[in-house]
C-alpha cells in the first residue's frame, strides 16, 4: 500500500512540475512586463505615478528635459536631486538603463491628462425669469 501511494504522489508531482515548466504568461495571453517597466515600478512609480511627480508637481517626469537623450538620463540618475535619490546601480547597467529609458519615453509619449466632466450648473430659482 505504501509503495502505491508513493508512486501516485511521485506521478502527481511529476505532472505538476511538467505543467508548471510548460506554462508561461506569454503563452496564456497574460501581459508580461518588460525590464524597464519592472525597474520603473520598483524605483520610480511611488513618486512618479503615470509620469507625474507627487513631490513636486511642477517637475513632472513626462515633460522633463532629462529625457532628451539616454546619456543625459544616465547622468541624471547618477546624482541625488532634492528628494529624489540617485540610482547609480541602474545607470551603471547599460541594459537596465536602456530598458528604463525606453519605458519612461513611452510614458512621455502617452497622454495622461484627465478632464473631469463639466458639472451641471444649476440656476438659482430666484434668478430664473418668471413667466408673465
Image: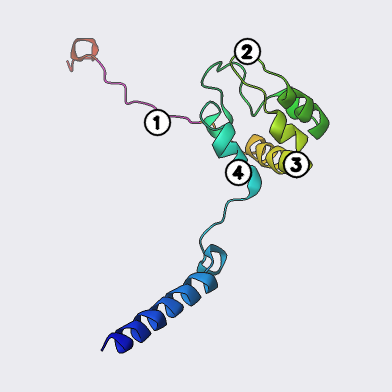
Pinpoint residue 36: horizontal percent, then vertical percent: 65, 43
Q: Which residue is mark 3?
A: 98
Q: Which residue is mark 1?
A: 117
Please name the residue shown 54% across and 57% down the image.
31
Please name the residue shown 26% across and 17% down the image.
123
Please name the residue shown 53% across and 17% down the image.
55
| Distance of label 1 from label 3 (alpha carbons) | 38 Å
Residue 44: name its quadrant. top right
| Distance of label 4 from label 2 (alpha carbons) | 24 Å
- Sequence-earlier tag: 4 or 3: 4
Residue contact between numbered discs 1 and 3, judged by CB atoms under 8 Å: no
- Sequence-earlier tag: 4 or 2: 4
Label 2: state its secondary structure.
loop
Q: Of 60 and 16, which appears nearest the observer?
A: 16
Q: Which residue is mark 4?
A: 37
| Distance of label 4 from label 3 (alpha carbons) | 11 Å
Pinpoint residue 1: horizontal percent, then vertical percent: 25, 89
Look at the image and name its color scheme.
Answer: rainbow
Callout 4 crowding tier (Cα within 10 Å): few <14, some 14–19, many ≥20:
some
Magenta segment includes 116: yes
Q: Which residue is mark 2?
A: 82
Pinpoint residue 17: horizontal percent, then vertical percent: 47, 73
- Sequence-earlier tag: 3 or 2: 2
Magenta segment includes 102: no
| Distance of label 1 from label 4 (alpha carbons) | 31 Å
Residue 113: name its quadrant. top right
Per the rendered image, the range of residues in magenta is 114-123
Amino acid at each position: 500500500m505504501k509503495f502505491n501511494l508513493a508512486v501516485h504522489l511521485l506521478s502527481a508531482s511529476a505532472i505538476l512540475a511538467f505543467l508548471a515548466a510548460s506554462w508561461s504568461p506569454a503563452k496564456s495571453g497574460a501581459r508580461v512586463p518588460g525590464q524597464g517597466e519592472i525597474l520603473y515600478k520598483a524605483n520610480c512609480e511611488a513618486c512618479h505615478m503615470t509620469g507625474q511627480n507627487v513631490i513636486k508637481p511642477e517637475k513632472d517626469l513626462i515633460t522633463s528635459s532629462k529625457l532628451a537623450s539616454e546619456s543625459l538620463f544616465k547622468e541624471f540618475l547618477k546624482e541625488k536631486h532634492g528628494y529624489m535619490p540617485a540610482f547609480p546601480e541602474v545607470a551603471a547597467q547599460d541594459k537596465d538603463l536602456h530598458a528604463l529609458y525606453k519605458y519612461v519615453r513611452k510614458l512621455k509619449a502617452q497622454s495622461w491628462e484627465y478632464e473631469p466632466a463639466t458639472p451641471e450648473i444649476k440656476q438659482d430659482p430666484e434668478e430664473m425669469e418668471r413667466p408673465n
